[in-house]
Image (tube, grey):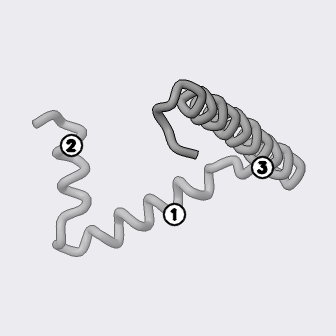
């Protein structure tokens, strides 16, 4: 086992150092740069927009394949 995994396993043992682990987690969370509202809205709109585009592409492909299979008599419809 390498040094880093041994170090982690020592800190997370049940001997009371679990509290040390969570204290370190909270200390690291304070260092995180959280997105501003404008960034969050822009990122959310991007994800929703891409989801809609991918849905439409998938739906369109499904319709084309279904109609193609119906045209050659493989699928019922």
Give the mark, 1 or 3, whose residue is nearer the N terminus: 1
Q: Earlier in the sequence, mark 2 or mark 3?
A: 2
Q: Nearer the viewer, residue 72 or 25?
A: 72
Q: CA distance from mark 2 to mark 3?
A: 36 Å
Q: Nearer the viewer, mark 1 or mark 3?
A: 3
Residue that badge 2 annotates = 5
What is the spatial separation of the Cα atoms under label 1 and label 3, in whole angstroms?
A: 26 Å
Tag 1 residue: 26
Name the quadrant containing residue 9. bottom left
Q: Which residue occupies 53% across, 59% down? A: 27
Which residue does the image show at 23% across and 74% down from the upper left? 16
Q: In screen coordinates, is 23 left or right of 21?
A: right
Classify residue 51 as left or right of residue 17: right
Residue at position x 63%, y 33% in the image: 67
Q: Secondary structure at mark 2?
A: helix
- Residue on which disc 3 sits: 44
| Local SS, label 1 | helix
């Amino acid at each position: 086992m390498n040094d880093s995994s041994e170090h982690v396993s020592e800190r997370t043992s049940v001997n009371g150092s679990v509290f040390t682990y969570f204290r370190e987690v909270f200390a690291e969370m304070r260092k995180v740069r959280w997105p501003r509202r404008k960034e969050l809205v822009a990122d959310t709109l991007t994800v929703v927009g891409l989801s809609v585009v991918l849905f439409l592409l998938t739906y369109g492909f499904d319709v084309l394949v279904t109609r193609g299979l119906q045209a050659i008599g493989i699928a019922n419809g």
